[in-house]
Amino acid sequence: MVEVRDSVGNLLADGDSVTLIKDLKVKGAGQTLKRGTVIRSISLTGDAQEIDCRFEGIKGLVLRAEFVRKT
């Protein structure tokens, strides 16, 4: 299993909650996720830099681990 770490080096696991550290434009959804937004119950992919998550109205959202911090 690949270790996935957030922007400050904390180890992430399936089901963790993360907070965005930067405003992110979501391609295809026409909206921006603001800094400080909490994303609950993430799931890890096989990639060390990508996490899979769900947010209101956005299906299949994949975030880079460098833009989140574990809460």
Image (tube, grey):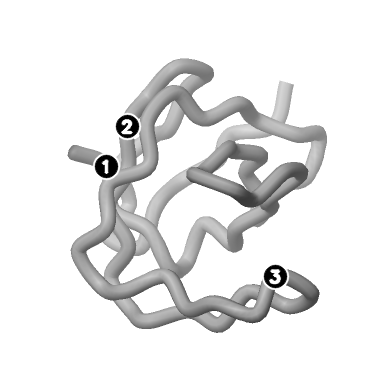
Q: Residues within 10 Å of mark 1 (few under 14, many from 20)?
A: many
Q: What element carries label 3?
A: loop
Q: Residues within 10 Å of mark 3 (few under 14, many from 20)?
A: few
Q: Do labels 2 and 1 touch, CB within 8 Å?
A: yes
Q: How crowded is mark 2: few (under 14 residues within 10 Å), some or many (20 or more)?
A: some
Q: Quadrant of residue 23?
A: bottom left
Q: Which of marks 3 and 2 is nearer the N terminus?
A: 2
Q: Which amino acid does label 3 sit on?
A: Ala
Q: What residue type is labelled 1?
A: Lys
Reading the image, the residue beneath label 1 is 70
Which quadrant of the figure contains the N terminus?
top right
> Which marked residue is nearer to the observer: mark 3 or mark 2?
3
Please give left or right for residue 63 compared with residue 32 in the image. right
Reading the image, the residue beneath label 3 is 29
Q: Which of marks 2 and 1 is nearer the N terminus?
A: 2
Q: Distance between the residues labelled 3 and 2?
A: 22 Å
Identity of the residue drawn at 27% across and 42% down: 70
Q: Distance between the residues labelled 2 and 1?
A: 6 Å
Q: Percent from the top left, x then y, of residue 7?
A: 35, 63
Q: What element carries label 2?
A: loop
Q: In which quarter of the image is residue 53?
A: top right
Reading the image, the residue beneath label 2 is 17
